């Protein structure tokens, strides 16, 4: 399975680009933001930024990683696509976690939307032995 991940600041075009690829190729979209908001609400907070200091950064994102894998694996094997889009990558450890959990044959296309001024995606994905497409 190939994971196509988008990173970037708010308004950079991550969601728009993800939706365009979804319309053209039918690859399912996984959005991190709703997953993380749900974790915050389940812990009594309205926003992720309020929840993280209360329960801890690693615990918060660890639960997000687990739920992302659950979503990917929940698709019927017969219908499982060869690619999945993660529209808004926030967690630097997610790809390593996906490899550890053997989520398909793992590789990554990281397509920078907008200015790409977030964390250094290029060196991060090169360290992870993945493919960078700009």
Image (spheres, rainbow, N blue to C red):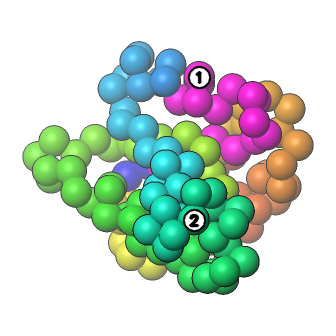
Identify the residue shown where x is 44% and y is 68%: 42
Instruction: Please indicate, yes or no, whether residue 11 appears anywhere in the rendered image.
Output: yes
Name the side, left or right, on which 91 lies relative to 124.
left
Name the side, left or right, on which 12 lies relative to 117.
left
Read off the residue under disc 1.
16
Identify the residue shown where x is 76% and y is 62%: 124
Vertical order, 54 against 113 (above or below): below
Start-end of magenta stretch? 3-18
Q: Does 87 appear in magenta? A: no
Vertical order, 97 against 82 (above or below): below
Vertical order, 20 against 18 (above or below): above
Q: Nearer the viewer, mark 2 or mark 1?
A: 2
Read off the residue under disc 2.
45
Residue 89 picture location, percent across and down:
62, 51
Vertical order, 100 against 47 (above or below): below
Identify the residue shown where x is 32% and y is 56%: 71
Check disc 1: other Cα within 10 Å, few if <14, some if 14-19, many if 20+: few
Check disc 2: other Cα within 10 Å, few if <14, some if 14-19, many if 20+: some
Q: Please name whichever residue, 10 or 23, is drawn nearer the observer in this view of the structure.
A: 10
């Amino acid at each position: 399975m190939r994971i196509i991940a988008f990173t970037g600041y708010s308004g950079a075009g991550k969601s728009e680009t993800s939706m365009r690829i979804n319309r053209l190729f039918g690859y399912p979209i996984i959005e991190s933001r709703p997953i993380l908001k749900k974790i915050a609400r389940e812990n009594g907070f309205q926003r992720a930024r309020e929840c993280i200091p209360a329960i801890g950064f690693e615990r918060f994102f660890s639960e997000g990683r687990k739920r992302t894998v659950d979503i990917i694996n929940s698709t019927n094997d017969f219908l499982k696509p060869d690619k999945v889009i993660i529209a808004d990558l926030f967690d630097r450890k997610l790809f390593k976690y996906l490899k550890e959990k053997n989520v398909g044959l793992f590789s990554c296309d990281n397509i920078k939307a907008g200015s790409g001024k977030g964390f250094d995606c290029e060196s991060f994905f090169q360290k992870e032995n993945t493919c960078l497409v700009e």
